[in-house]
Image (cartoon, rainbow, N blue to C red):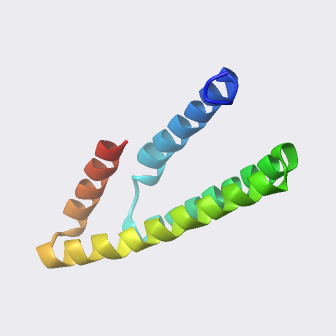
Amino acid sequence: MLDGAPISWWIGFHVVVLVLIVLDLAVLGRGEASSQTRRNFLFVVFLVVLAACFGVWIGHGEGRQRGLEFASGYLIELSLSIDNLFVFLLMFRSFGLSQELQRKALLLGILGAI
């Protein structure tokens, strides 16, 4: 047990996160811009559905209160990430960055945060 969860859960969590990062960087980071918007939207929908399924699983296994706590935390984080999009948009517009430099700055920022 590590912080209240079995080691296998921690290993599984990190494997899923690494797979999603590789999928995002290797698959979604390539292609032309017109197809990227649709693909990125579908990936976000996939992640939201995945989180909803995880929340239902938590609620079923740990109780309704824990499931609601997960859903509340997820919605708060989602709203904060949408808020960050507006901050990035303002920064990119004020610095006049091209599309390619915007992608590079976002990639370096995300990898630095990880």
Question: Closer to the camera, 11 or 100?
Answer: 11
Question: Which corner quadrant of the image does residue 103 belong to?
Answer: bottom left
Residue drawn at x 65%, y 63% as measured from the top left: 72
Image coords of residue 33 (percent x, y): 38, 67
Viewport quadrant of the N terminus: top right
Question: Closer to the camera, 70 or 40?
Answer: 70
Image coords of residue 83 (percent x, y): 41, 73
The number of callouts visible is: 0
Residue drawn at x 60%, y 66% as measured from the top left: 75
Q: Is residue 58 left or right of residue 33?
A: right
Question: Closer to the camera, 67 or 92?
Answer: 67
Q: Is residue 104 left or right of residue 20?
A: left
Residue 39 seen anywhere in this rendered image of the structure: no
The single residue placed furthest to the left in the displayed view is 95
Residue 2 vertical placement versus 60 (above, below): above
Residue drawn at x 85%, y 43% as measured from the top left: 61
Image coords of residue 35 (percent x, y): 47, 67
Question: Closer to the camera, 56 or 20?
Answer: 56
Residue drawn at x 40%, y 52% as measured from the top left: 29
Image coords of residue 88 (percent x, y): 29, 70
Q: Is residue 55 left or right of residue 18?
A: right
Residue 31 seen anywhere in this rendered image of the structure: yes
Question: Which corner quadrant of the image does residue 13 belong to?
Answer: top right
Residue 95 vertical placement versus 109 (above, below): below
Viewport quadrant of the C terminus: top left
Residue 113 vertical placement versus 8 (above, below): below
